[in-house]
Amino acid sequence: MGTLWLGRVRTMVNENDVQEAIYVENGLIKEVGKEIVLKNKYKYNIDQVINMHSDTIFPGFVDSHLHILANGLKLSRLDLSGVTSSEEMIQLLAERVNETKPNQWVLGDAWNENNFPDRKIFHRRELDTIAPHHPMALTRVCQHAILANSLALAEAGIDQDTPDPPGGIIVRDENGMPTGLLLDQAKFLLTEVIPPLTDEELDQICQTSIDYLLSVGCVGGHSEDLNSYGGFTRTLNTYQRILNQTDRRFRLNLLVHHEVVDDMHHAGWTSESKIGDIEFGAMKIFSDGAYGGRTALLRHPYNDAPETSGVCIHEPEELKQLVRKARDYHMAVAIHAIGDLSLQYAVDAIEAYPPPKGKRDRLIHGQLVPVDLRHRIKKLPVTIDIQPQFVTSDFPWVIERLGESRMPDAYAWRTLISEGIVCAGGSDAPIELADPILGIYAAVSRKKADDSHQGYIPDQKLSAYQAVQLYTYGSAHAIDKEEKTGKIAPGFQADFTILNQDLLSIDQEEILNTKVTSTVVDNHIVYQRKSV
């Protein structure tokens, strides 16, 4: 027996294909077409008709790159992402300190000095004034930097004699004393001493995050957090409790950090393993940092800090050996590479050790892709994971970082797609909000909603169809499932994102007014918007 779905069906088979009905059996789409035809053809098999009326049914949106548990933490911790001045940040921190018992940690997320008129980065002594009796750790929006007060640094044993760890920087003043700012690998010196979450707390943030993702129309996500929260087994157990032991349905693809890939295989899992709605994906490798802290690795120095070209987390030969290790495990790789030199090293490594037959690598972020690297990438079995919202968060300050001469190759999504490079759409949550509607708007407009200009580098705008493809076909392509999901077509999974407006036929500014009415996974409604 089967289900007949009725509504305005955007199959995403091509830009203009609109149908009226979908017939589903056993979680798979059997046929798509006109309502009267499918009703007559399957009248003895249909046991449920779900009429979405004027709503538009899209293939289920998938966030191709995020950190689900960190996103849950952001939703439950002090969120500093909306702070627009150092004075406002001081006030919020002071309020949180007053609510917290002495000696307990005060944790905050997503501060961004580029949103402040004075672009102030707090010194540990200023944080000491706010929190003299509480260790304080504040993670920057990029997740590649963290601020700490003196109590927190003392807990981590960080002082003037502590050496910079490989791939990280302890920022120091003119006297060699730590300022409290820790970049990239140095931040782990601090995070390792923050009291771990209990199993109950982990379950809560996981549940909160997945429920949020379902509410914004995500039927699944590709998450990287198996090297956090107590390690591989503890983190995997959390996901199993929330997804496989409750009635939640969410297609979870777990990237496996290279530091725990041995743990995964010792536990008996492989990249082909599937545990209910949970599957394992590529081996994750961080190759560099981010533009915010000037730790993304560039071929030429930063325009606004010519003394540095960024941070190389793994030297080229070491990176190649990590890729080789993945191949020994018959795994694809997912390499974080924001700067052009970092991307070059990643491409070198993939060319030296190509993925196994039938698997596809991914290059995460691709925020600076010069023409020579585009030519090489086109020849490789890879997907580039992009985050459209980075355009609205990083401009205009990123122009100062990179300089005008590099901008034609920066955040050049349209160029990548027009040259035949498949891109997938993600949020990198908690860095950005894990809401595909916001990502689609950013890809189409390349501006914030209240900006009056025509968009940053407007010739790189995507069409609405291309933007939706990022979260459908693109996300499927990244995990070698473009023949199973990402379209509404016979044989594909019955995963749908149902909206109150058709993103492909409305005005650009109307995109942000679009609401998710239902989210469907495996032919089951897992989220339904309450009527107002």
Image (tube, grey):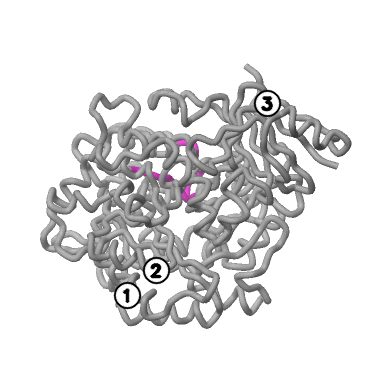
Residue 97 in view in this figure: no
Identify residue for label 2.
380
For label 3, the residue is: 52
Q: Kindly identify the residue that appears in the image at 75 percent across and 34 percent down.
A: 38
- In the displayed structure, would residue 450 be above or below residue 288? above
Left or right relative to 14: residue 20: right
| Any part of residue 303 in sight | yes
Give the CA distance from mark 3 to mark 1. 49 Å
Q: Amino acid at mark 1?
A: Asp
Mark 3: which amino acid?
Answer: Met
User: Which secondary structure lies at badge 2?
Assistant: loop
Decide which of 198, 224 is in the foreground and name it.
Answer: 224
Query: Mark 1 Cα within 10 Å, few/some/many (few <14, many 20+)?
Result: some
Q: What range of the chain is rendered magenta?
A: 97-111
Q: Work out which residue is located at the far right of the displayed protein and give it.
A: 44
Q: Residue 463: where, in percent of width, then height?
A: 38, 37
| Residue 7, magenta (yes or no) | no
> Type of residue at label 2?
Leu
User: How far is mark 3 from mark 2, CA to CA?
Assistant: 41 Å
Q: Residue 348 bears which disc, if any?
A: 1
